[in-house]
Image (cartoon, helix red, strand yellow):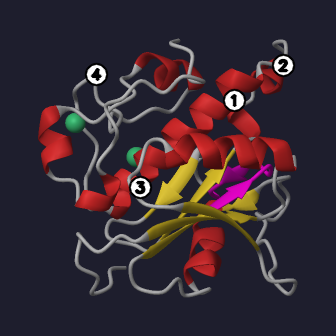
Amino acid sequence: MTDEREPDDLESVEVLEVAAPPRDLVEAVTAALSRRVSVPCRIRSVPEAFQIPHIPGRNQADADRLLSAVEALGPPVGHVLVALTAEDIGHPIFTHFFGRARHHGSAAVVSVARLDPTFYGLPEDRNRTVLRTVLEIVHEMGHLAGIGHCDDWSCIMRFASTVDAIDNRGQRFCPACAAALPPGFAPSHAPCPPDPEP
Ligand SMILES: [Zn+2]
Ligand SMILES: [Zn+2]
């Protein structure tokens, strides 16, 4: 599914709370995201009537149907919606996703559930959860900008199916992927103080 947006017209990113993680985490993620993109990032509440589609028989939201439902909220041209949820997201065939987005789409879905070290029985590590979440959002925004997966381990567009892979791939776009980014996505090359190196 594509629309007619030009790739260079990004004006803002709206972080949509959908069965959201705690508010302070959402705020920390949004603040950190603001330092990685060159457009304003805001928190937005989901409409009251919004329903999260679930996979029958599983305690998981259906990632693709959720993405379609978020897209149906119709972000105006130039505005990207990133639905941030505490719910685990999956697909009837695949076990889980960290995030979902369509190339040149207007919305992305990112789940914090499996980005949180406590999911794996590890001690809480708020900084790591925030960093992983921001990196996953930036990765999905790369797809929204029309960029596919990249083989370069130093690149944030490298596919990751585990949190270890997220921690081990680069945190920035490689030169080739960066060259394909529209201006609004232009990542800051300034250090991001609250982001610990993995
Ligand atoms: Zn991807
Ligand atoms: Zn790349």
C-alpha distance separating marks 2 and 1: 9 Å
C-alpha distance separating marks 1 and 3: 18 Å
Residue under circle 4? 154
Q: Check whether the beta carbons of the residues at disc 4 and disc 3 lie within 8 A of each other.
A: no
Which badge, 4 or 3, is on the more N-terminal residue?
Answer: 3
Residue under circle 3? 141
The number of discs equals 4
Circle 2: element type: loop
The answer to which of 102 and 196 lies nearer the viewer is: 196
Give left or right: position of 122 versus 114.
right
Residue under circle 2? 124
Which badge, 2 or 1, is on the more N-terminal residue?
Answer: 2
The answer to which of 19 and 35 lies nearer the viewer is: 35
Mark 3 belongs to which amino acid? Met
Mark 4 belongs to which amino acid? Ser
Which badge, 3 or 2, is on the more N-terminal residue?
Answer: 2
Residue stretch in magenta: 83-92
Circle 3: element type: helix
C-alpha distance separating marks 4 and 2: 26 Å
Which badge, 1 or 3, is on the more N-terminal residue?
Answer: 1
